[in-house]
Image: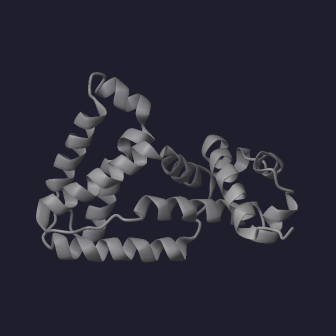
């Protein structure tokens, strides 16, 4: 039987996403990742080089999943609000990415996969420049960072969210996120 490299990579990425999101870069163990994936740990080194390469591949995959199909269309506040709403929905549905980004910031000296992620950020900045050329905050880059902060706040700080807005539904929080982002235009 031929070895299915793509399936093995998928199993490792799925397992690693769970482990890194739960325990961070330092806390995740390659032995446990491989065991839970049902794969020999040597495959991690063969496919990803090392634990850092695996973490970078996981974060890349999660960022790509977050952004897949998100399109900044329209103009002005409606466009920025829709973007924030989409990001908020995805962060709520897939909290692994938020956790991975938090672990990255807490444990690592710099961003992983910086080049490819910078390209994606540049595309989003350019889209904001087109959609809301007079956005507040001084630049489209500052506006993008603010939209991400607004959209990810609930998944980054769930306990604080529940303390500040204990009776707020997910729909109400989404509406607030859309409104706040739309005012940035």
Left or right of 171 in this view: 44: right
Which quadrant would the N terminus be assigned to in this image? bottom right
Residue at (64%, 46%) from the top-left corner? Answer: 18
Residue at (14%, 59%) from the top-left corner? Answer: 78
Q: Is residue 111 visible?
A: no
Residues 151 and 102: in front is 151
Q: Is residue 98 visible?
A: yes
State the image coordinates of residue 95 (x, y, percent, origin top left): 48, 44
Residue at (42%, 73%) from the top-left corner? Answer: 120
State the image coordinates of residue 8 (x, y, percent, origin top left): 75, 62
Residues 81 and 140: in front is 81
State the image coordinates of residue 132 (x, y, percent, origin top left): 16, 69
Residue at (31%, 22%) from the top-left corner? Answer: 166
Which quadrant would the C terminus be assigned to in this image? bottom left
Left or right of 90 in this view: 75: left
State the image coordinates of residue 88 (x, y, percent, origin top left): 34, 48
Q: Is residue 80 above or below residue 20?
A: below
Colouring mode (rainbow / by chain / secondary structure / one colour)? one colour
Left or right of 89 in this view: 30: right
Asked where in the image residue 22 lies, by quadrant, the reply is: top right
Number of numbered callouts drawn: 0
Q: Is residue 55 above or below residue 131?
A: above
Residues 118 and 171: in front is 171
Left or right of 96 in this view: 170: left
Q: Is residue 33 above or below residue 73?
A: above
């Amino acid at each position: 039987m031929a070895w299915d490299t793509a399936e093995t990579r998928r199993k490792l990425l799925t397992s690693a996403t769970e482990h890194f999101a739960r325990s961070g870069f330092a806390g995740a163990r390659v032995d446990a990742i491989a065991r839970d994936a049902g794969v020999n740990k040597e495959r991690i080194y063969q496919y990803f080089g090392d634990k850092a390469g695996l973490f970078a591949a996981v974060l890349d995959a999660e960022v790509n999943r977050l952004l897949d199909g998100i399109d900044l269309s329209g103009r002005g506040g409606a466009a920025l609000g829709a973007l924030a709403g989409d990001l908020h929905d995805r962060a709520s549905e897939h909290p692994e990415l938020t956790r991975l980004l938090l672990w990255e910031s807490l444990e690592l000296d710099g961003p992983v996969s910086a080049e490819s992620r910078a390209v994606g950020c540049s595309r989003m900045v350019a889209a904001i420049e087109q959609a809301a050329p007079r956005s507040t905050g001084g630049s489209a880059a500052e506006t993008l960072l603010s939209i991400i902060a607004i959209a990810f706040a609930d998944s980054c700080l769930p306990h604080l969210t529940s303390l500040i807005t204990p009776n707020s539904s997910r729909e109400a929080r989404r509406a607030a996120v859309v409104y706040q982002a739309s005012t940035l235009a």
